[in-house]
Image (cartoon, rainbow, N blue to C red):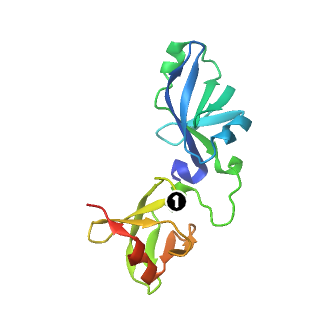
Amino acid sequence: MAKPEENYLSIGQVLRPQGLQGQVKIRPDTDDAGRFSSLRHAYSLNARGEATELPLHDISVRGGFVYLRIDGDASVEDAQKRRDLHLYVPRSEAVPLNEFENFITDLVGCTLSDSNGKVIGTVTDVLQPGANDVYQVKTPEGRMLLVPALRHVITQVDVNAKTMTADATKLWEVSIFED
């Protein structure tokens, strides 16, 4: 059976109720929260990966957060039941990516090797501290290596093959091990 993220992409998580009319505050899982403005629906996934469509209303974006009402919610109590809910869209409805862009969920699990063919480890997370993303890579020895996602360091990414290649010299100039 396919994992949910193979068919759906996470777009955000409900943080808490907002106001008295059933709206919720969403932490978006996107670099452009304005993309929510054009959504008419999202999906929730159960433990088996089965999707339930959730019509969305009254969408606004303020301060990097998204505020919206899910169809049928009319009170704080209704909205409270949505706390921690993850919202998804089908991959077929995802925004198109530009060259050199990938969805984070597709990068996690990729094997990072250097340009000499040495396996460095597996990407376990993508951190977004500011200027550029940072790949968290678990080495075969169990250590965590932080690798900046820069084109002159990461020279090739193939999410279909779940592989990444880093320039062998530059990788060790800019990467650090977590303490």
- Image coordinates for residue 18, horizontal then vertical, percent: 54, 20
Is residue 130 positioned above or below 158 on the image? above
- Name the amino acid, label 1: Asn
Residue at 46% x, 66% y is 148
The residue furthest bottom is 116
- Residue at the image position 48 percent from the left and 80 percent from the top: 167
Q: Is 95 on the left or on the right of 77, as rendered?
A: right
Horizontally, residue 142 falls left or right of residue 11, namely left
Q: Is residue 173 above or below residue 128?
A: below
Residue 56 location, quadrant: top right
Q: Is residue 108 visible?
A: no
Q: Percent x, y for residue 25?
A: 54, 28
Image vertical order of residue 170 relative to residue 4, above or below? below
Q: Which residue is mark 1?
A: 132
* Residue under the image location 53 percent in, 56 percent down: 104
Q: Quadrant of residue 139?
A: bottom left
The kind of secondary structure element at disc 1 is loop
Position of 120 relative to 26 (above/below): below
Percent across and percent down for residue 166 are 48, 77
Tell me where residue 140 appears, x and y as whole percent: 30, 71
